[in-house]
Image (tube, coloured by chain):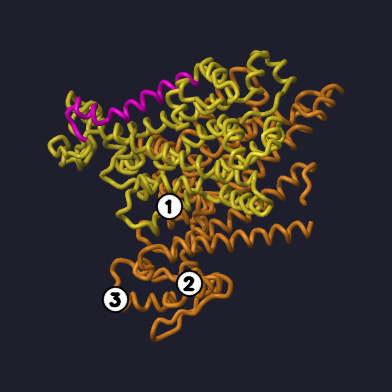
């Protein structure tokens, strides 16, 4: 999957013969912030993958209640300092229930990353499909798809996603539903990008040559266009990932996302709102996890974007000379 | 100009019609009995039968949809068995669970949502344009790096984290502010403002990061344009160059984006409303979703969609007004 490139930043993931994948990775590695973000995300992926293993090492599981560890006289606040941190419970326990917080956070990382990655994959599939079709199709297809895309971009995503939760039967697995809902509703930006990129690619010689030799449109898209589209699509996917993570957390926070007892950072935060006086650790931990994750993804996405942007690369060479940079004034970046 | 508006209005209407078809289809043809869902968990079979008759669920789907549209544009009469209940246009049906007309429920929730949207937008615009401008003018310096990191952190923080942080800091530890409880503006303006302060700050901070990034890039772009270079060559002072000549073009996309965002805040500020217990339209949506109150869900989606479509037209007009080079065609 293309999105894995963003997390591991390993060269072998970029097998697509995009223009200078190596060069891009080298530029990415030159940015300390992007490196740090990639390291953080690597740890996070490890945490998510190894969640059952870590739980076994700690000797806990995410759903066992420990009534003896919470003070029922004080409404269920954990005994001990920092929310009941101990050798058995590395990050303390959940107030009220006494469930192990470390394991729940680790399993929460799984939910968060899986939903975000899955939704991004759906967004890429639909976005690339619609974008290509809009660029290559006849006038009717083009105007129809462009209009649909415009509407999809404009509509408030969260409202629609929440509303969608009302019609799907309650026994449908929620993480899958979240992937579908986010993926189906938020592909507009990707489709726009792919269409614009394809249109500009169509003007290039190698694409014209391929068209003149008389291959089918499908072949043109697969052999000539898709490889060149990989770079911008990956960049945009890197922007979508943190948004999707926040979306999942938001939906779970609102009680319309992942259902308990499945651990989710967003859901933890929503219960934490009633506990922040008595047990601040319970607020801080999921908040920190979510913040660090989205920040790391955002920083890495920013780095990937800059590394793929030839204008940005030339600007780096100019150096930090303020006056020079100001007067040369290359186009905006954000 | 008139032609432009007519065309945009027709386009908007078409979009909303399509939206209504999609929404109606999703919600009333989806698996599950809409009458049972609309009526709620405590309904007995007779009540469900009555709801089914009122929603005219026995009719073909297109007739049902026609009734739905008719209700929005012309109002609708519901027979309650003994009497006739009239629902004025725009009628989004009845919420059986609350025993109330959906339109009335929306109107009840409007002031809280509007209060939040106006205040948060003011905070976001002021803060966003100021930081964006500063970071563009101090390009390459330490100020820019700090501001870039702050805005990155801002975009990465969901509102329920920053909101929770603000609540903990100002209400629990410092105890400078009371825990927000919505007070209508018409009741007590001073209390209204005090209670809205944190929601405004939370949503405004989050949104401002977006405007800061946009403002920064658009300022840089404007400053690189030929006419600015010409002014500079003629020896116009840097300060005057920015305030007199560059700002106007730079601010155009920001204004346009803020107008578009303003539309999506009507219903779209779900998280902030839930976080601070504001009785707004977004909170209504969440409540209706968890209780499966379908008529309300449909209505909120339609109203939010309408607000967004209108806001986008306003955004384009504002863009043209701010940047004269853009013509409305």
The chain drawn in orange is B
Q: Which residue is mark 1?
A: A162
Element under label 3?
Answer: helix
Q: Residue at x 40, y 81 (%)?
A: B80
Magenta includes B247? no
Q: Is residue B253 left or right of residue B235?
A: left
Q: Which residue is mark 3?
A: B45
Q: Which residue is mark 2?
A: B61
Front one among A49 and B306: A49
Q: Residue at x 84, y 26 (%)?
A: B230
Residue A334 drawn at (x, y percent): 61, 31
Whether discs 3 and 1 lie on one chain: the answer is: no
The chain drawn in yellow is A
Q: Main secondary structure of the magenta part?
A: helix
Residue A98 drawn at (x, y percent): 19, 37
Is A306 rendered above or below residue B277? above
Q: Earlier in the sequence, mark 2 or mark 3?
A: 3
Q: Residue at x 34, y 69 (%)?
A: B36
């Amino acid at each position: 999957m293309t999105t894995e490139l963003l997390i591991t930043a390993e060269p072998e993931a970029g097998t697509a013969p995009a223009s200078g994948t190596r060069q891009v990775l080298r530029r990415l590695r030159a940015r300390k912030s992007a490196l740090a973000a990639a390291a953080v995300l690597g740890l996070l992926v490890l945490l998510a993958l190894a969640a059952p293993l870590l739980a076994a090492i700690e000797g806990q599981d995410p759903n066992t209640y420990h009534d003896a560890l919470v003070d029922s006289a004080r409404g269920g606040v954990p005994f001990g300092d920092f929310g009941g941190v101990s050798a058995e419970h590395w990050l303390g326990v959940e107030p009220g229930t006494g469930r192990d917080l470390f394991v729940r956070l680790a399993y929460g990382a799984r939910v968060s990353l899986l939903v975000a990655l899955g939704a991004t994959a759906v967004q890429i599939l639909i976005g690339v499909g619609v974008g290509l079709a809009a660029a290559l199709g006849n006038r009717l297809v083009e105007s129809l798809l462009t209009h649909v895309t415009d509407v999809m971009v404009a509509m408030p995503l969260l409202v629609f996603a929440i509303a969608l939760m009302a019609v799907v039967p309650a026994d449908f697995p929620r993480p899958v539903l979240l992937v579908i809902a986010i993926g189906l509703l938020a592909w507009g930006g990707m489709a726009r990008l792919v269409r614009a990129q394809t249109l500009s690619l169509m003007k290039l010689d190698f694409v014209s040559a391929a068209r003149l030799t008389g291959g089918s449109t499908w072949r043109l898209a697969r052999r000539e266009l898709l490889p060149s589209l990989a770079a911008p699509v990956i960049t945009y996917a890197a922007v979508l990932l943190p948004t999707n993570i926040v979306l999942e957390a938001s939906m779970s926070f609102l009680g319309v996302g992942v259902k308990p007892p499945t651990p989710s950072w967003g859901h933890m935060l929503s219960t934490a709102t009633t506990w922040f006086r008595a047990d601040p650790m319970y607020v801080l931990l999921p908040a920190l996890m979510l913040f660090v994750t989205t920040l790391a993804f955002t920083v890495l996405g920013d780095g990937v974007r800059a590394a793929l942007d030839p204008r940005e690369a030339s600007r780096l060479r100019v150096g930090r000379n303020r006056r020079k940079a100001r007067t040369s004034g290359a186009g905006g970046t954000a | 100009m008139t032609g432009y508006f007519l065309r945009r209005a027709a386009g908007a209407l078409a979009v909303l019609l399509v939206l209504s078809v999609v929404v109606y289809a999703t919600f009333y043809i989806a698996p599950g009995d809409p009458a049972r869902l609309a009526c709620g968990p405590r309904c007995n079979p007779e009540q469900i039968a009555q709801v089914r008759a009122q929603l005219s669920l026995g009719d073909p789907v297109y007739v049902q949809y026609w009734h739905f549209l008719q209700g929005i544009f012309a109002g609708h009469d519901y027979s309650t068995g003994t009497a006739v209940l009239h629902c004025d246009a725009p009628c989004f049906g009845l919420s059986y669970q609350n025993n109330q007309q959906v339109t009335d429920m929306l109107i009840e929730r409007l002031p809280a949502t509007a209060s939040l949207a106006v205040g948060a937008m003011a905070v976001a615009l002021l803060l966003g344009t100021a930081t964006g401008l500063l970071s563009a003018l101090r390009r390459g310096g330490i100020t820019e790096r700090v501001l870039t990191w702050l805005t990155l952190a801002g975009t990465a923080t969901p509102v329920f984290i920053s909101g929770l942080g603000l609540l903990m800091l100002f209400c629990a530890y410092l105890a400078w502010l009371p825990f927000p409880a919505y007070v209508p503006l018409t009741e007590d303006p001073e209390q209204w403002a005090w209670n809205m302060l944190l929601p405004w700050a939370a949503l405004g901070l989050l949104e401002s990061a977006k405007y800061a990034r946009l403002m920064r890039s658009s300022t840089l772009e404007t400053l690189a344009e030929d006419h600015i270079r010409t002014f500079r060559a003629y020896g116009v002072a840097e300060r005057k160059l920015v305030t007199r000549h560059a700002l106007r073009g730079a601010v155009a996309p920001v204004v346009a984006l803020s107008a578009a965002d303003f539309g999506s805040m009507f219903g779209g500020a779900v998280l902030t409303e839930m976080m601070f217990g504001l009785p707004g339209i977004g909170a209504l949506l969440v409540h209706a979703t968890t209780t499966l109150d379908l008529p309300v869900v449909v209505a909120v989606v339609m109203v939010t969609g309408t607000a967004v479509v209108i806001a986008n037209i306003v955004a384009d007009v504002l863009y043209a007004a701010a940047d004269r080079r853009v013509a409305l065609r």
